[in-house]
Image: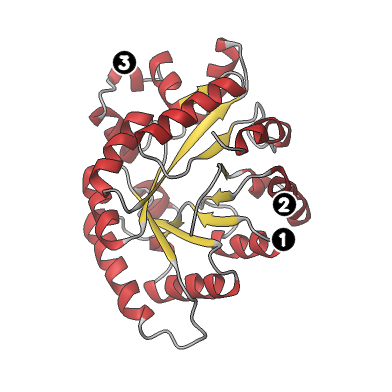
Amino acid sequence: MKLAGIGLWTAQFDFQPAAVVRDTIQELEELGYSSIWIGENVGREPISQSGLLLAATEQMIVATAIANLWARDPLAMVAAQQTLSEAYPDRFILGLGVSHPRLVDDRRGSRYDQPIQTARAYLEAMDDLANQYRAVRAGSTVRMLAALKPTMLRVAAIQADGAHTYLVPPEHTAEARQILGPDKLLVPEQAVVLERNPDSAREIGRRHLRRYLSLPNYTRNLRRLGYTDNDLDGQGSDRLVDALIAWGDEAAIAERLRLHRQAGADHVCLQVLDPHSRGLPLPQWRRLAALCGPQ
């Protein structure tokens, strides 16, 4: 599977009827975006939604970013991956990960424990069960692991086809590439705000960041990268916002893309932040489509 151009990461489809989602993904494909990455929280089930998006498009690559491994047993995950990969060859990426204690313990009633060991055992079980899968098999499958810290990146390097990183600056991309080696896929998410006014852009960025600054998986990683209490307290310092949110005009967004690619990213998926928390950023997606060509 070749990930060319740029992709989009979005949770905004959850707030739109399925008919609007179908029309929108078709326009995004026509605009030149090559991939769409969708998350999992308490909205649409991501593998089912992947089927909706794949059926509505002809070439778009669809990725779960990420499917929560606590939500499905390994056999269910294998069957879902095989089903979509066989039906839509070279167009589905199963991105999976351990999520966060709050989302697992409080919302799913499971017990979040030993994420590294859990990920290793889960991926091993998937491999064993894939050999027993008895329906029509896909010609190939792609599996990526959500990873931030070196320990999980090493799991991705050994047991997956690559890593999907989220809420990271380009310097993390460089570190991840070094750990993964040259032959694994590396796809960071990059949040962006198409706004040239610093105060307005940072306000939108902080509204996005505040949900993550209470999640230890992210804050520990950011501390490891050199960010301090002064950066992480409240809704985040200007330094933190500017590092994690690319804001400005198209040229500013293109520069952040360049930095991730220079650091070793194979592909970057942009998460466009709309001024309205549940808004569909279609006007911004249309503007940024100019970046889909050769960079």
Between discs 2 and 3, the one toward the N terminus: 2
**Residue 288 higher or lower than 99, as above or below:** above
- C-alpha separation, residue under disc 2 versus residue under disc 3: 40 Å
Question: x, y percentage for residue 124?
Answer: 27, 70
Give the image quarter of residue 262. top left
Q: Nearer the viewer, residue 108 or 47?
A: 47
Q: Check disc 2 and report its element: helix, strand or loop.
A: helix
Q: Nearer the viewer, residue 157 or 48?
A: 157
Q: Which residue is mark 1?
A: 56
Q: Which residue is mark 2?
A: 21
Q: Residue at x 59, y 31 (%)?
A: 273
Q: Residue furthest front?
A: 294
**Residue 269 higher or lower than 86, as above or below:** above
Q: Residue at x 21, y 60 (%)?
A: 117
Q: Check disc 3 and report its element: helix, strand or loop.
A: helix
Question: x, y percentage for residue 189?
Answer: 47, 39
Q: Are marks 2 and 1 in contact (CB under 8 Å)?
A: yes
**Numbered-mark total:** 3
Q: How would you rate the neighbour count of disc 3 (Cα within 10 Å): few for under 14, some for 14-19, many for 20 or more?
A: few
Q: How would you rate the neighbour count of disc 1 (Cα within 10 Å): few for under 14, some for 14-19, many for 20 or more?
A: some
Residue 114 seen by the camera: no
Amino acid type at image mark 3:
Asn
Q: Check disc 1 and report its element: helix, strand or loop.
A: helix
Q: Residue at x 63, y 45 (%)?
A: 33
Q: Is residue 29 left or right of residue 75?
A: right
Q: Nearer the viewer, mark 2 or mark 3?
A: 2
Q: Quadrant of the C terminus?
A: top right
Amino acid type at image mark 1:
Ala
